[in-house]
Image (cartoon, rainbow, N blue to C red):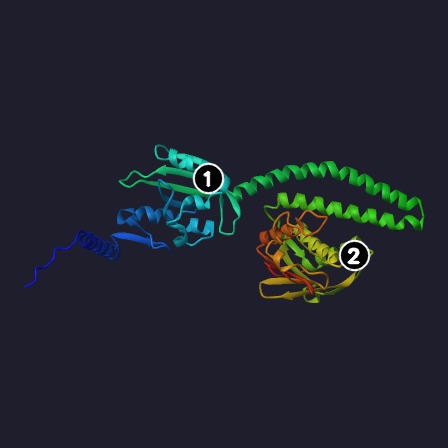
Amino acid sequence: MKERRKPSKDVKDLKVRLSEAQELLVAIKSGAVDAFVTDDQKVFTLKGADYVYRVLVESMNEGAVTLAFEGTVMYCNKFLSKMLGFSIKKIIGRSIFDFVAPDEISRFKSVLRQSKTRNIRAQFSFKKKDKIIFPVLVSCSSLKDQDARLCMVITDLTELESAKRLSDIGVLAATVAHELRNPLASIELSAHHINRTIKDSRIEGDMNSIKKCLSESDQIINNILLYSKLKVSHLRAVTINNILKECIDEAMRRFPKKNITVNVRTDRIKNLSIEADPLQMKEVFNNILNNAFDAFNKNAGIIDIESQLNDSTVSIFIKDNGEGIEKKHLDKIFDPFFTTKTQGTGLGLAVCHLAVKLHHGTIVIESDKAKGTMVIVTLPIGKKKNA
């Protein structure tokens, strides 16, 4: 009879590890332990005692993350996942430094070290999945438990900084209006005086160019002022068709040299009155029509304007057959200061978007580089009235 060999040390260790793994799986299944498995098969667990903590952070409108002292992400909430543009399983197990702007990693490491003994708050730049850098406020402290962990709350400061920038723009806009409108008015008066007193066909073209530049300058100032102040709409009953026709007439005067045919088919809303801010609506259609006229490089083309009336909304369609917009620009078309023009502030469509949004409406742009552009403005009617 053969003598049975004693199990080797390696076999004993393997049995212990298998037993521990089995206990862990039982604990996970029973809910005593939550587990996250990353792509490289690392397993991070959170004890059931952390359940209340997790419920709290999942309901927050800020990013929350639990870190090992060296920076490994052990847990994060859905809000942080959305903020960074990665799924939760793509964040857990990675180093938090992967999401910090490269030139700020050294300072971020210093904050983690200091957070072991006291609460730290500091502003940093994080990077999203698409490599976009954005500002955040980080609050970090040590968790008082048996594990070496840090708790961090991450607040996206993008909107706050945008609000501050808009506030600065408001101050700048007031200064621009004061400093530029007076000399522009003097130029306009002088041009009018010259045009009235000197009858010379040789300068007629130059005078028309001066008028056009004055009109464009005034529109730029209006856009800057309006965008910096657009917060509420002062609604009253307005006949939307009258505003639209007034804007068309102004556009025809601004572009006298362009041979543009404007076809207006809005009879179905001829007497329709809606609840809207007349000044904001005028700016919306002025900016859309400016872009439509600018789309014709060869000074000839067609603009079709139509309307559609539904039970609770009215839609205005403004379509041109000029040079369209490249697809890569369509996602940015409403961003403040974004422009593809050599001259312009990039605020025209931003003003349109914000004004229409304040009216609880929508503005959609469809464009083909070879066929032209269509802008669809849809507004709620409110109490339907006949003007």
Q: Amino acid at mark 1?
A: Ile
In the picture, the disc for residue 105 is 1
In the rendered image, the residue lying farthest to the left is 1
In-front residue for pair 307/155: 155
Percent position (x, y) of residue 290? 72, 54
* Residue at the (27%, 49%) spot, across then down: 48
Q: Quadrant of the N terminus?
A: bottom left
In the picture, the disc for residue 252 is 2
Q: Counting other residues with Cα less than 10 Å from the Cα at mark 1, is it few (<14), some (14-19), or many (20 or more)?
A: some
Residue 198 visible, this angle: yes
Percent position (x, y) of residue 179? 73, 36
Residue 148 in the figure: left or right of residue 159 = left
* 289 over 133 or under it: above or below: below
Label 2 element class: helix
* Residue at the (68%, 67%) spot, across then down: 268
In the rendered image, the residue lying farthest to the right is 199
CA distance separating discs 2 and 1:
56 Å
Q: Quadrant of the C terminus?
A: bottom right
Nearest to viewer (mark 2 / mark 1): 1
Percent position (x, y) of residue 309? 63, 66
Residue 377 visible, this angle: no
Q: Earlier in the sequence, mark 2 or mark 1?
A: 1
